Amino acid sequence: MDPTLSPVGGESAQTLDRGLRLLHLVADAPGGLTVTEAANRLGIGRAAVYRLVGPLTGYGLLRRDTEGRLRLGAGLLHLARRAQPLLAEGALPALRRLAEQSGATAHLTVVEGGEGVALAVVEPSWTTFHVAYRAGVRHPLDRGAAGQAILAGRDGRAGPVTTAGELQAGAYGVAAPVLGVPGLEASVGVVALAPLDVDEVGTQVCAAATTIATALA
């Protein structure tokens, strides 16, 4: 049998588990981690951490900064970009339904590099005028309904967020965070050229966020 196809043994599975836990620990530490801190949090010795760091660094998933602290590597961005089409595909049915219900342009926004990025956009089919919103557009998280909904999700708040004219003059937005998907910070929202019924559209947006979370979880 090809050894690369052999079942993973107990020791290998433990190493994989520790490596993944290490990545999550570093991801949750904005200032990075020292090897000692990582060892303490994993409950293993420093030597074992060094053995994990070697291959993870080799694949670009971790890096050492100038002070020797462990930080996430650029290789994770490559993996994230490869996963983005799958996220968009899973979200499209709910986004189409939301756009048709609300008569507004619907979008899924994710966090990348500390900014919000429009990953998928669906325009309504029956309106005379609607906002043209391009997939790939970036914006600060503290501006616009999509980014502010993501920040609200970090605090565990699931309700809709509304804004007016923050990213585009004359545009109105309603968005809600996508919660419960490990490793994903995202929001679902709509943007329109006229004020939206917050009660009605807010309910639709929250329902879409829940549907997408279920589809992606």
Image: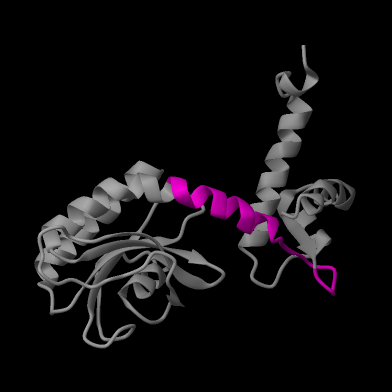
> Which x, y percent locates residue 41?
71, 55
Residue 71 vs residue 95, the one in the foreground: 95
Q: On the rendered image, what quadrant is the C terminus found in?
A: top left
Question: Is 66 colored magenta in this rendering?
Answer: yes
Q: Quadrant of residue 13?
A: top right
User: Magenta residues?
Assistant: 65-86
Q: Is residue 196 visible?
A: yes
Q: Is residue 181 visible?
A: no
Residue 180 vs residue 122, the one in the foreground: 122
Q: How is the image coloured?
A: one colour
Question: Is 73 colored magenta in this rendering?
Answer: yes
Residue 135 vs residue 204, the one in the foreground: 135
> Which x, y percent locates residue 179?
37, 56
Residue at the (16%, 61%) spot, across then down: 203
> Which x, y percent locates residue 93?
26, 46
Q: Is residue 34 left or right of residue 13?
A: right
Outermost residue, top side: 1
Residue at the (34%, 42%) spot, across then down: 215
Residue at the (73%, 34%) spot, across then down: 14
